[in-house]
Image: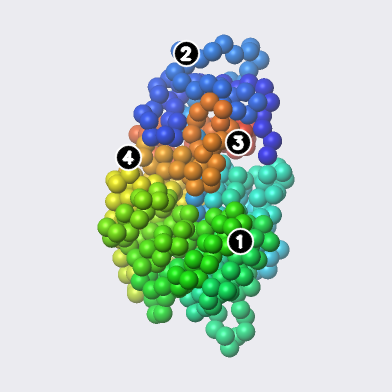
Amino acid sequence: MQTATGVTVIEHGQLVDGTGSTAIRDAALVIENGLITFVGPAAAMPVVPPNATRIDAHGGTIMPGLIEAHFHATYFDVEALEDLDIKYPVEYVTLLAGCNAKLALECGYTSARSGGSLFNVDVWLKKAIETDMIPGPRLAASGREICGVGGLMDWNPDYRKIGMDGLVLLVNGADEARAAVRKLVKDGIEWVKTYPTGDAASPDVNDHHTLCMTFEEMHAVVATAHNHGLKVTGHCRAMEGIKNALRAGYDTLEHGTFIDDEALEMILARDVPVIPALYFELASIERGPEFGLSQRVIDGHQETLDGGTESARRILKAGGRIGLGGDYGFGWNPHGQYARELTFFHKHVGFTPLEVLKCATQTGAEILGRAHELGTLAIGKLADVLVVDGDVVADIAILEDRSRFIAVMQGGIVKAGRLARA
Ligand SMILES: [Zn+2]
């Protein structure tokens, strides 16, 4: 991805650096050739060349680009789970994914970690973004998701002989789990997404207290993935699935819904980031009836929301790491509303705005394995920066409104926001 040339100064706004530190009033940020070279009070800013580009952030906030830690570029706002796998061919899904990537960048998300992809779209979407063919977040790519036969994602009945060609690799036993990871290694992915547990979406046989993979399968996934330098995550709701994932050596936990003291200790012992994706649950409860979700499913989402909220609070309070990403890409939780997750974590889960912003920037970069170059505003890092019209610390919901972005920058280049349109 190209970076800017020359010098840019962003000045007069408050600056939130993404570490959780208090905002700096009347701050300045200096960018040289795409990298941050000064961050601090405007009064202490070094002399810059007279031809430097100047961006006035007066009355606004200068902050790191947001990081979506559970992004599905290929989920195209489906109205039923089944549509994910069989509605469209790879050609059309790829185009939809490109549109979703562009939208995410316009929403202030300069990086994203995929939580699973149809076909092998992510790997090539990443290439298109990295070569500036299309705009989008810097992407950590996943591939097809791994689930046990008969588990949550194995919804097509055998008599229809449809299989799960697009979205999922179904496995029976450790050998098949290893084979699935080896296929993903060849595909060129970075993150292996698995399904250790069920979900409220499938109340009959794979609800949120059931397991969809054995420990042996999960351990085989991790051993094979780590051998090839890939990372592993999983959809973890049921407590035993969470513990299996932690014992197997997972790198992150998606959801981490139901935890007890032992699970919390295990999360903290290895400092494993958890990405709760909680707004999805609220959206499923509030908008589910419009999309035909049954009362049983909605009740399950309520239990998940309550459990997940309590777990996220406990993990943060105990010093654990929470990443923010929202499973956007369902009809009731569509692409473009990513920052609702941030508002939700402040208003309903009780995180302070600065804690929320840290989770959505610094922790996101740690999950990506790129904390040395992304995630906070610090000297030497890539200038992935948002300039927002308004005080984001006083009202974090401002980030939900794309029209409030003055600039969305990657590597010092303005890619979206008012200045991009001007
Ligand atoms: Zn997901």
> Where is the C terminus found, in terms of image quarters?
top right
Q: CA distance from mark 4 to mark 3?
A: 26 Å
From the top left corner, tell me how far across and down residue 407 is, in percent.
56, 33
Please tell me whether mark 1 or mark 3 is closer to you in this view.
1
Q: Taking 114 as reference, is 26 above or below it?
A: above
User: Which residue is disc 3 drawn over?
Assistant: 410
The image quadrant of residue 412 is top right
Q: Amino acid at mark 2?
A: Ala
- Of all residues, the one furthest to the left in this rendering is 261
Is tag 1's residue or tag 3's residue first in the polypeptide sequence? 1
Q: Secondary structure at mark 2?
A: helix
Q: Which residue is mark 2?
A: 44
Whether the residues at callouts 1 and 3 have beta carbons within 8 Å, the answer is no
Nearer-N-terminus badge (1/2): 2
Of labels 2 and 4, earlier in sequence is 2
Describe residue 360's horizontal placement relative to residue 183 as left or right: left
Q: CA distance from mark 2 to mark 4?
A: 29 Å
| Residue located 45% across and 24% down the image | 13
> Could you tell me if the residues under marks 1 and 2 are in contact, i.e. CB atoms within 8 Å?
no
CA gap, disc 1 to disc 2?
47 Å
Residue 283 lies left or right of residue 98; in this view the side is left
Residue density around tag 4, few if under 14, some if 14–19, many if 20 or more, within 10 Å: some
In the image, is 122 to the left or to the right of 22? right
Which x, y percent locates residue 172?
54, 78
Q: Earlier in the sequence, mark 1 or mark 4?
A: 1
Residue that numbered label 1 is attached to: 143
Residue 303 appears in the rendering: yes
Q: Position of residue 369 (x, y in %)?
A: 53, 45
Q: Residues within 10 Å of mark 1 (few under 14, many from 20)?
A: many
User: Residue, x 59% and y 58% (percent of image)?
Assistant: 227
